[in-house]
Amino acid sequence: MKISSSYKVFLFMGAMLSAIVVSGCLEAPEASAALLDNDQLTIHGWLQVGDPEVSQIEHNITKNTVLTMSLIKVKYQDEEISSVVGGGIQNVTSRLHIDSKQAFPAPTIITYRITMPGGKKLPLETFSSLMSPSVERTNRDNNISSLRWGNTTELQLDNGNNANAFFYKGNFSGNGSYVGILGMVVTYNDENSSTMIIGFVPDGKFAVQLGDSRKELLFIDGRKELEEMTDLIQTVE
């Protein structure tokens, strides 16, 4: 995923400032949540985690001028696969009489939506630059490292918008658990806002450290899981 520099973000913000100042508004209207279809989430065993989180992003245009953007975040996880894998870990550790707390990277989708003052919209390249710390933080918080960016494609959403989809691979390790990761970042603009969606799924052999040895518990078809996640992302409203 190509992320432009913060300097380019600053130049764009400066260029749009004059248009916003004319309207006398430097504060954005509250963004609406980017939600996935509830029926499809239920069918595939996914759940929304917690309530939408509303916050603000402030960008210093000049020494005395701050541009305030409205951000809303929603998180989803695949509880079905997490339950299956969790049960498998418990069965193995109980059978071997090992007290072990193994971690598993539950398939996750996080949506972010931003609104700008005066109804302005960010070019997608600028939006990607602004949100790149969120991508890095999401992977870091979930013990995902060694990211390798791959293909980029266009994704047709059910709401009629065309989105850019960036795909990546990585590795998960945590509490003695190991598995590959397939992820994607989706960005698009609609009439009133900019939306970014981050998603990742486990891929390949899921191994755990049991005592002095590492044991492979199961194989996860990450490609299939990624296809399911893509179908869910396409339902975003």
Image: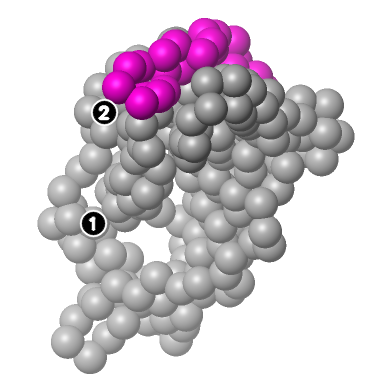
Amino acid at circle 2: Leu
Front residue of 106/154: it is 106
Asked where in the image residue 84 lies, by quadrant, the reply is top right
Element type where label 2 sits in the image: strand
Q: Which residues are magenta?
A: 206-232
Q: Viewed as shown, does residue 174 lie left or right of 2?
A: right
Q: Which mark is residue 147?
A: 2
Q: Say if 161 sits above or below 218 in the image.
A: below
Q: Nearer the viewer, residue 84 or 202?
A: 84
Going by the image, does 59 lie left or right of 182?
left
Instruction: Return the disc, 1 or 2, that comes first in the chain's sequence.
Output: 1
Q: Name the image quarter holding the N terminus.
A: top left
Q: Position of residue 86 (x, y in %)?
A: 62, 30
In the picture of the structure, the residue carrying the numbered disc 1 is 9
* Quadrant of the image containing the C terminus: top right
Where disc 1 sits, the SS reads helix
Residue 236: quadrant of the picture: top right
The answer to whether one can see residue 134 in this image is: yes
Residue type indicated by callout 1: Val
Find out whether residue 215 is within the magenta segment: yes
- Residue name at image x 46 percent, y 56 percent: 121
Task: Return the x and y of residue 130 as percentages of the image width and height.
Answer: 31, 54
Between the C-alphas of marks 1 and 2, the distance is 24 Å
Say which of 158 and 75 sits in front: 75
Q: Residue 119: x percent and y percent?
A: 53, 65
Q: Residues within 10 Å of mark 1 (few under 14, many from 20)?
A: many
Seen in the picture, residue 236 relative to 16 is either above or below; the reply is: above
